[in-house]
Image (cartoon, grey):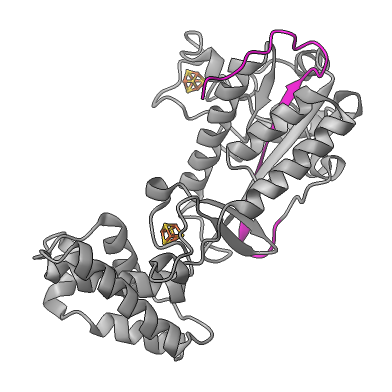
Amino acid sequence: MNKNDLKSKILAAFSEEEWAALAAGKEKAPVSDFNREILLRLREQDEVFSGEADDNAVAELYQTVAAFLESCWSDEPGAHAYVLQACAALAFLYQIPLHPQNKVHYESCVRNGKAKYFCPMREEKSGSVCLFCPAETTTELENISRSRCSEAAASRGPVSALVMEEIFRAGFQDAGIIPTGELIFYPDVRKTCEENRCGGYGRSWACPPATGTLEECRERVLRFGQMQLFSKAYLLADSMDFSCIGSIMKDFKERSRALNSRLRQQLHDILVLSNEGCGRCKTCTWPEAPCRFPEELLPSIEGYGFNVSELAEKAGIPYQNGKNTVTFFGAVIYNEKNDNRRRQLNA
Ligand code: SF4
Ligand code: SF4
């Protein structure tokens, strides 16, 4: 079946009255926000899909989801159509996982413009809806992390391996090590900050001028011997789709803060940089008062005068990940030898 025919079939599954109720959040049966969002996206956005959806697979998905709903949600038969059609749209049109990220905690990476998903909840048994989901098991991710950490342990030592392990645990997709002696601090990058095209200059403690002069940044970095650059790529609907940049940036920052927090529990002295400004508080205290959360403050990697594409090359990780993607970078700066106050995490 042509995917656009499947789209028409899904749209035709509900009456105009039901679509209006869905848009107003007033359906007669319960619908999750996730399924509502997917169905309304299909109806309201003028997306054209390319390729075919296998007829047998579509029929099997409907049967499997219907059987599942019948067995565990038989008291709400009116809700089933919303789940069925949302699952079909997710599996065959959008090709994204059938459950929301915040429920199943799947991870993703983007390579050459193509997204891959890894779900820790995936069930491989027959009759499971997971069999129709584009998310794979987390085995591949775990294997990548394990082999990269072993390489880091062999080439640099246990602290580098620990930093890399935490980078992958935080959901970043790439990491590479650069000795700090190879870093170049560019006055021109700082000049770009001053032009304030990003709107972050002079807005928080994470950006210049609050981060200090380039020389002060250099001194702060060169107290350490290693930098581990990390990155995550995100897929955009198309090259002009900037609507989701805010949420992508937030996701990257939250992962960076989680990484910083876990590393600070294990290592004595580190510096973690992230992309662009801070955004942790609604209104920053800069310059009137000190930062409210100095332990969580992640200065901007560009604000330290780094040319990020050059760092990516030195670290051996891709600077770009294909068409319609955006890749963000951060860095952990640490000493392999001096972190003798390492502590074990309970979790
Ligand atoms: S793999 Fe299974 S549990 Fe995970 S998102 Fe897909 S359907 Fe849901
Ligand atoms: S944590 Fe709050 S106070 Fe500190 S730099 Fe960020 S926004 Fe400003």
Q: Which residues are magenta?
A: 321-347
Relative horizontal placement of residue 39, taking residue 294 as reference (left or right): left
Q: Residue at x 63, y 17 (%)?
A: 266
- Name the image quarter holding residue 215: top right
- Name the image quarter holding residue 188: top right
Question: How many circles with numbers are drawn on the protein?
Answer: 0
Residue 12 visible within the image: yes
Q: Position of residue 94 (x, y in %)?
A: 46, 70
Report the quarter where the N terminus lies. bottom left
Residue 308 visible within the image: no
Q: Is residue 66 above or below residue 31?
A: below
Q: Nearer the viewer, residue 306 or 80?
A: 80
Q: Position of residue 197 (x, y in %)?
A: 61, 40
Magenta part mainly helix, strand or loop?
Answer: loop
Q: Position of residue 271 (x, y in %)?
A: 68, 19
Q: Position of residue 251 (x, y in %)?
A: 50, 41
Q: Is 163 part of what is drawn in magenta?
A: no
Q: Is residue 338 above or below residue 80?
A: above
Q: Is 323 part of what is drawn in magenta?
A: yes
Relative horizontal placement of residue 75, taking residue 293 as reference (left or right): left
Q: Nearer the viewer, residue 151 or 41?
A: 151
Q: Residue at x 20, y 70 (%)?
A: 70
